Amino acid sequence: MPANEKQQGESAFEAEVLRISRALFAPENEFQGSTYIGTAERDGVFIGPDSVTIVECTVSRRKDKAEKDGKKLLDACLAMAQKYPFKSVKGFFVTQHEPTPDQRTVIKVFGPPLIACSFAQLRGQLVDSLRYLELRGSYPFGSAREPSSGDHEDLKPYVAVDPVESSTGEPLSVVRVASEVKSGKSVLLYGDYGAGKSMFLRELYRLLAKAHRSDSFGPFPILLNLRDHQGQVHPVEALERHAREIGFPSPSQLVRAWRSGDVTLILDGFDEIATPGWIGKTSAMRDIRRRSVELVRRFCRDSRASTSVILAGRAHFFDSELEMRTALGTRDGSLSLMAGDPTEEQVKKILDAYGWHDALPDWLPSRPLLLSYLGSSSALQNSVEGTFGRSAGEGWHMMLDRIAEREASMEVGVDGFTVRRVLERLATQARRSTDGLGPISQDELTSVFQSVCGYAPDEGSYQLLQRLPGLGAMDSIDGSRRFVDVSLADAARAGDIVACILEPNTETTLLEMTGSIACLDEVGIDVAAVQLEGESTASPGRAYSSATSFQRQGVSDAIIADIVRVAARLWPGDESRIPLSIHEVEFRSFTLTADAKGYGWLSFHDCVIQELDLTDHDGYALPHFQDCLIGQMTGVASWSALQPDRFVGCEVAQFDAQMSTAKGILALTTTPLNKVLLTILKKIYAQRGTGRKESALFRGLDDKHRELVPEALQRLTTEGFVTTARSNSTRIYIPVRGMTSRVRRILQAPQSSADSLLK
């Protein structure tokens, strides 16, 4: 090592010894340190109210160095004992590494009040950091748990999902963030529900802990789960409670280490601290939220300037980023990180840990937590095929249960069933908006909770409402919320539809739904069908009876349409005997099932249908469409292919290209197998992520082409274009995530396509 580097290392060691000694022996006087006793310079002299401590430190491992410094220490101790006769006097000979046996013997010969110790032993009097790290590793890290078991220790290997720097959009790895933190940078990490914030902090903590174990001069990480500190506003109290929670024997040591700047502070879950005394004053939401994070703000304010403070929580707990930064008291220059969605490769790695190695269904959500829920369901059922449910509806139905259970585990007194009902009711309320996502006012949050639970929310329940999964801030002025995930909102709003089909004569919030509201999408229809499949009292007669009863009571025709579509999905062979008319409703998509016997009893008037999917139409009677505007007519190339009396005064913006319809594909100049491949791709990828029953893939084909369907499905599965699921005994083929653009290119120019699928 060059001389200047060696000298710098020795100086850094001496400075660290003095910093620790100052915190231990004279915390009330930060300016004591090196001084003279008589004419001799001493490395450190610390005079406290009841004691005098003299420190000599060295990086040398030589015996003669111990003899020289020991003599200096003893002389200094004797001089100070005469000067301060009523104070205890002690001398420390501190070595960078463990003192050698010769050095210990030399100091022992000098006798009391001298003692030889290593830097680690000296620091251990301030705080036993290695003991803390050992105990903290066995305690939960926020919400990072294995979904199938709830175990916080037996977690699958960490898959890095890099957050992005909010101002530049640059992704930062956990290693890069750890490097920034070690250089003194503070961090604000925020993101939506299930984005992997706690997992990221857990990995960051482990990297910082590893760095401290290899270099004890550096600070060690302390990570607090803020949900453990409800009602606390004083950092000292929080640190002492944290010590007791993990079994650390000396809570005061953590406080002393924090005050001395010897730690890196990580605070997880600023959205999970309840506010005592909340009484439902929605007009003062900002003040309530500000009070709820008083502990965080004091930690930021009272920590030393050299202490890195890392904060994490759900951004939508606040109405704006400005409110979040102000309320939390984030430090100037803090690194602002937003948790993002994983890449396709990262999605595969997450699911690979649960034994899923096949293609990923197109409806699969991106958030790491939801992916883990899906993956863990496979482990739970000991069936890889069950990982993604029996359909998109089965998967989202299971996820809503898991999401609700997870939220309930953070709030004592509210169970998972209740959390799901609140989420479902809020999704129903959001249907009043144009896009079906919101806004939902703070008063509506409170009133929905009260209508579901029968009592007003207390402080803990209020926190639950502010951070409900899938809800984000919409308006920073009035604090309104909106659903940020279309599929989650659609899956949740299926709950009230199911309830009204099962109990058509019971009072329901749907009776208040009049006028124009958003309809369920395909995911919502699938979720409702899945829920009703398990109900013995569900029947087509009850469903259609509910629809006609609601229509007589003036309920929005969008609700009537939802009930009809769910009934048609479950019982396609059972027609309604009572004609039903749907007026002035907008659909994102409307799909006619291949198993239907006919829709002659159903009519649509003055409706807007963004996509009418007739891919599975097999000659049965279509519904009547009067003065409707249809954006995309899928599966049909022109008016001539339709029953003319079924479309009166309607406009269609776009038909399918002739060659991409079933008849057009069969007329192509290509091999019979390629025709079947193209037909199946068209059917499966036409429906938005929910897939097609196996029986539907044979329809519209003659006997010669039907014989090739099994071979075509085998090739599509092998090539990764489709994946399978089951609904009862029915096999469903589902689009694969990330393959839509490739399929679109094939279908747009099937005869000139050079894709390897069409050999």
Image (tube, rainbow, N blue to C red):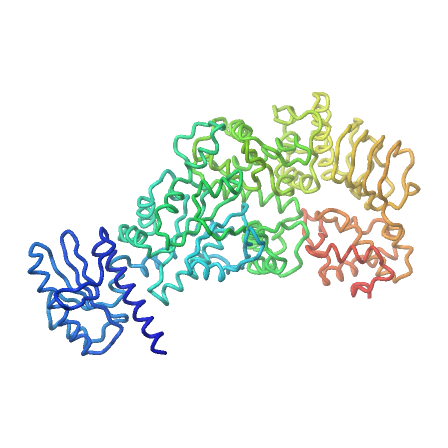
Query: Where residue 562 appears, x then y in whole percent?
Result: 71, 33
Query: Measured from the top left, where is residue 438 in percent x and y?
Result: 62, 34
Q: How many marks?
A: 0
Displayed quadrant of residue 749:
bottom right
Q: State the quadrant of the N terminus.
A: bottom left
Q: Residue at x 64, y 27 (%)?
A: 510
Horizontally, residue 216 falls left or right of residue 491, namely: left
Residue 742 placement (x, y as % from top left): 76, 58
For the residue pair 389 and 517, the one nearer the viewer reads as 517
Quarter of the image for residue 92 reads bottom left
- Which residue is at the far top? 553
Tell me where residue 659 appears, x and y as whole percent.
88, 53
Picture residue at 27% right of the left edge, 60% below the top: 19
Please tell me which residue lies in front, 722 or 334: 334
For the view shown, which residue lies furthest in the right direction?
640
Return the residue nearer the eye: 280 or 176. 176
Instruction: Report whether 631 appears left or right of 424.
Output: right
Q: Quadrant of residue 165?
A: bottom right
Pick whichever, 175 or 749, lies toward us.
Answer: 175
Picture layout, residue 49 above or below residue 434: below
- Compared with 534, 547 (above or below) is above
The answer, for residue 1, to whether it is visible in the render is: no
Asked if residue 639 lies left or right of residue 169, the reply is right
Q: Can you see residue 17?
A: yes
Q: From the viewer's perspective, is residue 332 above or below residue 71?
A: above
Is residue 628 found left or right of 167 in the rendered image? Answer: right
